[in-house]
Structures are given as structure tokens and as C-alpha cells.
Image (cartoon, rainbow, N blue to C red):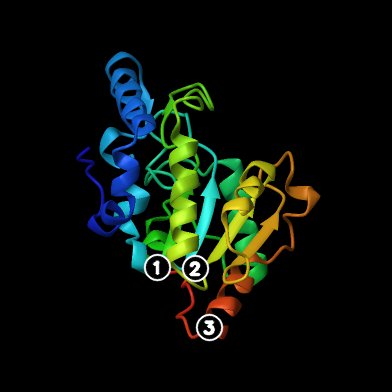
Amino acid sequence: MDVKIEPSWKERLKEEFDRPYFEQIVSQVKAAYRSEPVAPEAKNIFRAFDLCPFDKVKVVILGQDPYHTPGVADGLAFSTSPGSPIPPSLKNIFKELASDLKVPEPMSGDLTHWAEEGVFLLNSILTVRQGMAASHGRMGWEIFTDRVIEVLSRERAHLVFILWGSKAGMKQQFIDTSKHYVIRSAHPSPLSAHNGFWKSEPFSKANFFLVQHGIQPIKWIK
């Protein structure tokens, strides 16, 4: 199947694109876009891949599914379209960033800069019906994104995987922890951040690991 995605990812994932489950995803997603309001815009489904080529990935941050509020999702996990209000979980991410790195909190929820720095902002589910969280959870997207994590783990070395919350934490089974660094904590949602997200210092820890392995650290702030 010919999928419009960044070439380095297309090469690594070409076998997945020809599997029956992926054909079913495409069929269901196309039908959804024809019949209901879906986020993100179709052109942004693979935006995380397009902005962060396979060999440029340094850090993986795993989200669940796109924001279902109309006009907010931009194809990057936790990121928002320019001008959109900053959702509560992202506000908490920015508070922890400011505390961790002793910097001002970002004023925009647009995380395009992170993606261009080598932060692969991957949602487990890549589409959602507007107004209905997790509504595309049974389409097969998680099979695909599990394979994405496996390919990164197998073919790259010295990556940082930031897994926030129990659902993201389940993905650790696909990561070779003998060569990658996994940072796990509670989800940044206001409902759970108090369970270990605060003072987890994921941003400085990620950069420390990268520098230890001779890799340019992430510029989390422009």
C-alpha cells in the first residue's frame, strides 16, 4: 500500500503497510473522515513521522489519542494547533519543564519545535472522532504504533522513551531497555499528576542520558 509518509519511515514500515490489519485501518479511517468530524486533519495523521525522520529521533514521548476538541489536534502527541488554548495535561507538562530546567513556561502549546529537535511525539491511536475520546481505539492503530516502537527499539540505539501513565507504560514491553533509557511516571493529567509526575524531571534526565552517549541534547525551549 502506498502511504504518504516521510521516506525514511516508509522504508522501515513498508511491510506493515502491506499487512491486512493496516488495510483495515485505512478502510475504516477513510470511511470515518467521510461520515463524521475527525481529528486531526487527514493531512496531519502522520505529521509526527514527517517532522521527525527515523534517524533523527532522540526522544520518544508517547500519548494516547489526539485531542478530540475541534481544531486543537495537530498530529503530534500533546501538541496543539497554534492559537489553541493549552489543555490541562500540557499545562502540567510545561510546569514540570519549567521546574525541571529552571526556565519560563512556554506560552504556546504548539510542540513543532520539539519534533524538529528530534522528539518523536507519537500517539498510540492516530485519529479520533471529534467530541469522543478514544472513539477510534478499536481500528487497529495500536497494533501499528506498537510495531513503530519495536522498529525504533530494534534498529536504533540510545533513545529515550518517556512513558507517562499506565497505558503508555505498557509499551515498555516493546523496548529493549539494555540499550535505551525508559522514563516512567504518572500521567500529567490533573487527575493523576500528584501520583508521581511532579518532580520526575524527565527533561533533564533525557538530556543527561543523551549527552552521556555523545548525542546533542534537546533544546526544549526555543
Mark-to-mark CA distance, 1 and 2 = 8 Å
Q: In this view, does 118 lie above or below 145?
A: below
Q: What residue type is labelled 1?
A: Glu
Residue for point 28% across, 23% down: 30
Q: Which residue lies furthest to the top in this view?
A: 35
The residue indicated by pointer 3 is 213
Count of picture labels: 3
- Front-most of 185 and 130? 185
Find residue 117 and name its label: 1
Dot 1 and dot 2 residues touching (CB under 8 Å): yes
Q: Is mark 2 on a helix, strand or loop?
A: loop
Q: Where is residue 118 in the image (x, y as percent from the top left)?
A: 41, 66
Mark-to-mark CA distance, 1 and 3 = 17 Å
- Front-most of 110 and 134? 134
- Tell me which numbered mark, 1 or 2, is placed earlier along the sequence: 1
- From the image, which quarter does the C terminus lie in? bottom left
Find residue 220 and name its label: 2
Of badges 2 and 3, nearer the viewer stands 3
Mark-to-mark CA distance, 2 and 3 = 18 Å
Q: What residue type is labelled 3?
A: His
Give the class, few, some or many, for how many residues have Cα within 10 Å of label 2's Cα (few <14, many ≥20): some
